Amino acid sequence: MTVQLDTTSSYNSSTGIFTAPVTGLYNISASFYNSTGTNYAVVDIKKNDSIMFRQAVGYVIPDATISGAVYLNAGDTTGIHSTYANSQSIQVDAGHAMSIFLVH
């Protein structure tokens, strides 16, 4: 994924992990596409490896969006994590987007 704007260098594009630079309420959202053609996908928003929100998407209507507000302490991590039913990893791909920003 190409990073368009990260004024605090808090997002690691190699791992897909965002580390909160300051304590506060963050909005996290992503649109994604299930390209398996045969399986459903499960997409989670996690905080420090704990699932906060979950969205499932099938292969008949493969586009979906997940979003939520998560309170993070400085140093907490968050990100979008996704798997197929058969445990293969998927990513938010080209033409789709992810955003994380501090609300308050």
Image: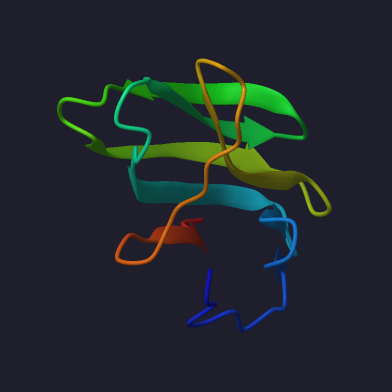
Residue at x-position 53% and y-position 41%: 90
Residue at x-position 62% and y-position 21%: 87
Position of 37 with respect to 73 (left or right) is left
Looking at the image, residue 63 lies above or below residue 94: above
Where in the figure is residue 9, as x and y percent of width and height?
72, 78
Residue at x-position 56% and y-position 17%: 86
Snapshot quadrant of residue 3: bottom right
Where in the figure is residue 15, as x and y percent of width and height?
74, 56
Position of 75 with respect to 85 (left or right) is right
Snapshot quadrant of residue 94: bottom left
Looking at the image, residue 61 lies above or below residue 73: above
Which of these two is toward me, 96 or 22? 96
Where in the figure is residue 26, as x and y percent of width and height?
53, 50
Q: How many marks?
A: 0
Looking at the image, residue 22 lies above or below residue 68: below
Looking at the image, residue 100 lies above or below residue 34: below
Where in the figure is residue 20, as x and y percent of width and height?
72, 57
Which of these two is toward me, 37 or 82? 37
Residue sitting at the far top: 85
Residue at x-position 45% and y-position 52%: 92
